Image: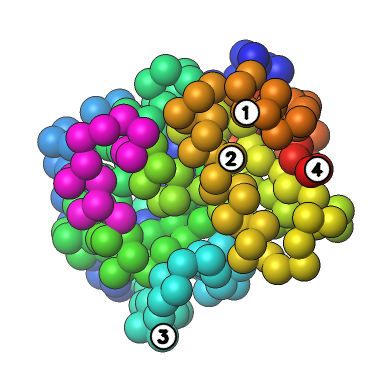
Amino acid sequence: MRFSDIQPRHVLCFLGPPGRFAELCRLIRSAIDAAAPGFEIDETFSQSSPDDRMPMSFDVCRDRVHANAWTEADEDAVREHGCVIYVLGPPMTAEDAVEISSRALRLVVQALDSGVIAAKGESAGVAHGTDRWRELGRQAEEQRGAAEIARISRLAFSKRPLTDGDFLFSVGFHLIGIPEVFVSKRLSGDERALSAIIDAVAEEVIAEGVDAVLARRGATLQPVDSYEEDDFKYNPYGAIRVSR
């Protein structure tokens, strides 16, 4: 079920060292040609100078679920960056989202190998440290099953848990073609336990489909009203709300 005809897109943010903007743009274009067809550098917002907003932005977006996903070296790299390169992915359908997201992850790893010093997925507002990005990339390359590739792509490009007061929820599941998951805080006082429920419901949706999960968990599917349709974080597939 869709609540909008909007097609999600990846927006990737890469930070590079001072003085390497033109070189990194060239290397990223080569990586796109080799590993991520359909992606393109955003010429309008990329810049050859540092952006003072980046340290705060990366701090807000960094992954706080996976242990050691962010290190002091990553923090230093963001603070000392000298250029910013944005990359746009192609519009995605539910059917091709996992494949395109796996290309996005491959592109992130190749960009890091080319000299990028920090990376962030803007379409969910999530940042991992360089070691974690590479770990996710290795895991994806080792997998052949669609469900496992979807799981790794979800971990790479989604953010959780966020909260609206009553629920903990995800942002970014539209990037693998499924609804977000909202879990009532009444189920547990432990955010990590609720995050695990979010992850479990997402994997059930990939394996069984939305309808089966809604029926078994007594959940509902509702539109996402947290973002406008023109926001890259907007999920046209809605949100599964789990209250019991």
Q: Which image quadrant is residue 49 in?
A: bottom left
Q: Earlier in the sequence, mark 3 or mark 1?
A: 3
Q: Is residue 232 left or right of residue 132?
A: right
Q: How many neighbours does mark 2 have within 10 angstroms: few (below 14), some (14-19), or many (20 or more)?
A: many
Q: Earlier in the sequence, mark 2 or mark 3?
A: 3
Q: Nearer the viewer, mark 3 or mark 1?
A: 1
At mark 1, the secondary structure is helix
Label 1, label 4: how many angstroms apart (C-alpha)?
13 Å
What residue did someone put label 1 on? 213
Q: Nearer the viewer, residue 78 or 174?
A: 174
Residue 224 sits inside the magenta stretch: no
| Three-letter code, disc 3 | Glu
Q: Quadrant of the N terminus?
A: top right
Residue range (magenta): 136-149
What residue did someone put label 2 on? 201
Q: Earlier in the sequence, mark 1 or mark 4?
A: 1
Q: Which image quadrant is residue 224 in?
A: top right
What residue did someone put label 3 on? 72
- In the rendered image, residue 80, in percent from the top left (x then y), is placed at 39, 80
| Three-letter code, disc 1 | Val
